[in-house]
Amino acid sequence: MPPSAPPFGAAVIRLLLVTTALLGTLLAGAAPASAHAALTGSDPKDGAVVATAPQHVTLTFSEKIALGNDSIRVLEPSGKRSDTGEVRDMSAGGVVKYRVPLHAGLPDGTYTVAWQAVSADSHPISGAFTFSVGAPSETTVALPEQSAGGGLVGALYGIARYTAYAGFVLLVGGAAFVLACWQRGAGERPLQRLVVRGWITLTASTLVMLVLRAPYTGSGKLADAFDLSGLKAVLETKTGASLVSRLLLLGAAALFVAVLFGAYAKREDPGEKKDLTFGLALGGGVLAAGIAATWALSEHASTGIQTGIAMPVDVLHLLAVATWLGGLAALLVALYRVPDIERGAVRNFSRVAFAGVTVLASTGLYQSWRQVGSWSALTGTAYGRLLLVKIGLITVLVGTAWFSRRWTGRLGERLPERLAPEAEAAATAKEEQTEETEEREPQGAQEAQAEPVTVPADPQRAAQLARQKAAMTTARVKRVRDADPGRLGLRRSVLAEAAVAVVVLAVTTVLTSTEPGRTEEKEAGRSGTAAAAVPDRPVDVRLPFDTGGEDGKGTARVELDPGRSGSNALHVWLERPNGRVMDAPELKVAFTNNAEEIGPLPVVPDRIATGHWSADGVQIPMPGTWELEVTVRTSDIDQVTVKKNVKIG
């Protein structure tokens, strides 16, 4: 006897465990996603020490953002607000710049600048930095530990984003599978439930995102989701308009689903059904493109370079993903829940999936170039690494689909002839007996009260026997069908495809909220390679030199204490190669910040002992990587300048 298919639940549990592990590995190691726009500069700069209090604080961003009057806050060391709260847009010539005025008569000390905004691609961004007036001081202001879009609200919003994509895939892909691959499937309850659940999931997720949008981009407090004033402000934004548009399109999609599983499923005339198929395909395609456009109009495609091309390409990309992965889900449901799906339907889906993969590859290639921009960003940024993970998963998915295509050729076209009439007769008998039972049930109940019926002529008993016979025949048909090795192999390969598709959707969701590699690399280029030194640790470096004259070789040891922005004490010692003290007629020092084009800042230390020079009050205006120059003159004509990059916090 040929082996039967393994229980569906056991196979699902095994694959869900693998899928959960993959998702956990992916999402647990992912840092909080940053947004498209980024802070590229400020005046005063981060960590700068200025002599007098500035009249205003200016922030420069990589792209256009949305700021409110309370989006930039400047706090004194005591925590008191020192800004007027009025944010002014100073953008000009492609430079995005905002300024907030400060009150007059501010005391000396360390000031904290905290800001929060919404980038053009709809993601919240925030940050904080400090600068000092006169000299650094202690401050009671604690920098925010939670970035914008984080916490419980951020987690809920992220879940809603994922389920929205999943609902879109099931809705569009399931409907496309019925219209393009298996029109008879419109009358199958499992497929109807799949598409309807996709519509419900997408609608519910969109409503959740609309309600959570205000706290997601603002306070981060879940209670603010019920603030009507915040909801009103959201509706005036690009993202709010996109979410409302999606809800309106979903209302039209509900009518489409009703016609697909109502009038269309019942239509039997081939000519009329062909015309209705064309109309539903055209109308459904327009609705699907419109829903996909609500993402393109408010996500990464709407910002950056070539937006006029990027948004239509993004729509095509989403439609290709939905057609492929949603059709895959519909095929999986049909293989496990529908007893007699034809091989032709599976072959039709194979062709549709191939077209979807082709569109997916071409549009994905363009999107990758647009968002990454360089080979270094592909491996050196979070977006690029996530993109490589997605490409790898898509490759696995295509490979699994190849196995599914092989199993399709081995799939039995129909039930064995000796069982097909029995199955049909059983189904017919079951329907007839059910109707007869419903009609005769009151009469049978009256007879039962008068005299117990113990003979098979009892209509209820006859109906029960018919149902049992139909169930036994159905179970027998199912055993034979499940024993078909082609169907068994196809089930397993499609189930594996679906498991990988779940992870692909998770990666896609994370990608849409991650700063593109092109922007991240551009931001890194602007900030240079400077890195902050360890606080309160003096800078201590040694620079070998050779002036070229007699007794001209030695080493200059330079110490800068405390080694941070602001006022520092400088000490320089000269030593011979044998470690003995070395003297020199003249020694000079200079500091240059090449990334910020500051300097050289000359320092002429005083000779306080043989081979020892010192200078107090050496001002380093900001932290970063500074080029230290030491000029040593050992005679009237023998002189050399040595350089070394040092990190000053």
Image (cartoon, helix red, strand yellow):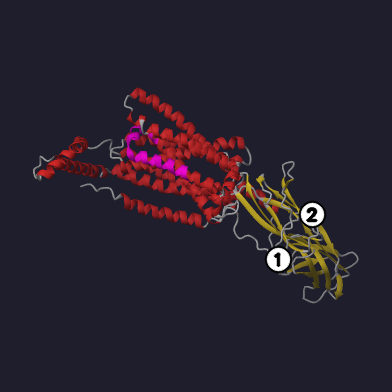
Mark before the other along the chain sequence, 1 or 2: 2
Res 600 seen here: yes
Task: Locate the C terminus and report the quarter of the image it occupies.
Answer: bottom right
Quadrant position of residue 284? top left
- Number of labels in the image equals 2
Instruction: Please report the bounds of the magenta region as a residue range.
Output: 177-204
Left or right of 97 on screen, residue 484: left
Residue drawn 17% across and 43% down? 464
**Residue ID for mark 1:** 139
Is residue 584 shown above or below 495?
below
Confirm whether residue 358 shows in the render: no
Picture residue at 66% right of the left edge, 46% below the top: 65
- Out of 431 and 289, give the one closest to the viewer: 431
Query: As shown in the figure, which amino acid type bears the numbered disc 2?
Result: Gln
In magenta segment, residue 196: yes
Determine crowd level at label 2: few under 14, some 14-19, many 20+ residues with C-alpha closer than 10 A. few
